Amino acid sequence: MRSIMKYIIPVVLFFAFIGLGYELIFNPLGFLTRILMIVGFVAVIFLGYRWYMSRKYGTPLFPSQTGPSRAQLRKAKRTSTQRSSSPAPTAAFKPRTTNMMTEKKKTSRPKNRREGHNLTVIEGKKNKKKKRAFF
């Protein structure tokens, strides 16, 4: 079965490209109308799906926000493990002047990491028999 498909698929694709070229050369307006009809059909299906899903789940039909929010970007910046080092300023560019407060805020942030854990062992009566109906 696979050996037959190995030969059939390229032949079908070859004839499809020949038909596409023929259509483009001898009937470009018909080709354009077919492409526009396909795009319109896909758009109607897509809008119908979006409308159905927005009605079912109560979400807007066209959500306004795309991508992560500002809070998510700030959190990603804080939790990033890679720190990019800024290149040394060259003679062509002026170095930026920074405020002492921003420098102090950046450097005065200590890492609060605990070495141990907060788990404790609770001793209890381990040999006490439980009253159960099933043994």
Image (tube, grey):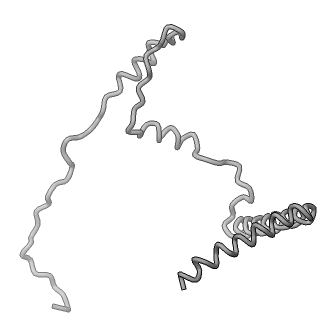
Q: Residue furthest bottom?
A: 134
Residue in the image at 23% along x and 40% along y:
114
Which corner quadrant holds the N terminus?
Answer: bottom right
- Of 15 and 132, nearer the camera is 15
The x, y position of residue 124, in whole percent, is 11, 66
The x, y position of residue 129, in whole percent, is 10, 81
- Relative horizontal placement of residue 84, taking residue 124 as reference (left or right): right
Q: Is 9 located above or below residue 69 in the figure?
A: below
Count of numbered tags: 0
- Of 110 and 41, nearer the camera is 41
Q: Is residue 42 visible?
A: yes
The x, y position of residue 20, in whole percent, is 80, 66
Q: Is residue 44 visible?
A: no
Q: Residue furthest left?
A: 127
Name which quarter of the figure residue 81 lies in. top left
- Relative horizontal placement of residue 80, taking residue 124 as reference (left or right): right
Residue in the image at 67% along x and 48% along y:
65
Residue in the image at 40% along x and 32% along y:
83
- Of 6 and 132, nearer the camera is 6
- Relative horizontal placement of residue 68, taking residue 112 as reference (left or right): right
Q: Is 8 located above or below residue 100 in the figure?
A: below
Q: Is 67 located above or below residue 29 in the figure?
A: above
Which corner quadrant holds the C terminus?
Answer: bottom left
The x, y position of residue 79, in whole percent, is 41, 40
Residue in the image at 90% along x and 61% along y:
28
Name which quarter of the figure residue 42 lies in. bottom right
